[in-house]
Structures are given as C-alpha cells and as structure tokens.
Image: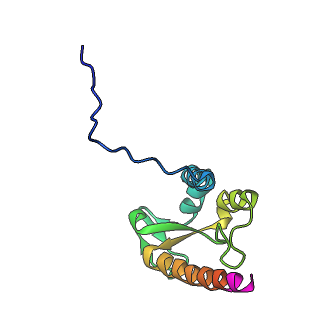
Amino acid sequence: MFVAIPNKDKVIKPRKPINRNTWVKTRLRSASLIWPARNEAIKAARAERGKYRCEQCRDLFLRSQIQLDHINPVVDPKTGWTTFDDFIVRLFCDAEGFRVLCRICHESVTSVQDAMRTYYNKKRKEEK
C-alpha cells in the first residue's frame, strides 16, 4: 500500500473566496448555450446548405464563421447590472431576441456596446 507523505517544503496558498454572483452568472451563461431558441435563430438565418446570412452585412458565411448576438444586450450598457431576474430574462430570450452576425460585424457591435458601457459607468461614478 502506498501512503502519501506531505511535502513540508511546499507552501500552500490560501484560495480566494468564491464570488457567488460571478459563479452563478458563469453557470447561467454556460446553460444558455443549449437554450433551444438559439438553434431556432441559427436555423432562421440559414440561407442555403451550410451557409448563413449575417443580419448586418447580409453576406453568406459558414457555420464556423458566424456568432449569435443578443439584440438587446444581456447587461444593458446604459443602465448596467440591475437584477438576476433581468439578467435571466435577457439571457434566455426568444429566437426573435437573437441575431446571427459574422465575426467582424459581431466584433464591431460588441466594441460599440463596450464603449457605451465604459462611458455610462464613468458617468455613474461621477454622479456618486
């Protein structure tokens, strides 16, 4: 029988406490990947076999070249985080709440939303 002897020279770092909000948000986002409405939105964007139309630039792309975007951001850039109820309703929306975008269009939409989020976060901090 093998018995493990602890190494006295090894320093064990204490773990950071778990941030419950972050943990729950991460699990909800993972669960949203199998939400049936996502597949419905992707099917609706299918233009021909293996090709999907980007809603913004209207070009055709392979499945590996498209990304699904929430029309209404899960966390609104203007108001920021509100409640878990709002987060869940926005994350698990109907198929009409999604749009299929190519990577380039999705990056441009996301960068605009990130800039808005930064602006409004700064504005909220100044008001306090």
Q: Which stretch is magenta?
A: 123-128
Residue 117 is situated, as x and y percent measured from the top left of the image, at 62, 79
Scheme of colours in the image: rainbow
Horizontal side of 61 relative to 100 (left or right) equals left
Residue 44 is situated, as x and y percent measured from the top left of the image, at 58, 63
Horizontal side of 18 relative to 13 (left or right) equals right
Q: Is residue 79 above or below residue 127?
A: above
Dominant secondary structure, magenta: helix
* Residue beneath the point at 33% across and 45% down: 11
Extreme-top residue of the structure:
1
**Residue nearest the observer in this picture, 20 or 65:** 20
Extreme-front residue of the structure:
8
The quarter of the image holding the C terminus is bottom right
Residue 48 is situated, as x and y percent measured from the top left of the image, at 46, 65
Occupied quadrant, residue 113: bottom right
Q: Is residue 124 magenta?
A: yes
Q: Is residue 22 above or below residue 9?
A: below
* Residue beneath the point at 69% across and 68% down: 81
**Residue nearest the observer in this picture, 110 or 37:** 110
Q: Is residue 26 magenta?
A: no
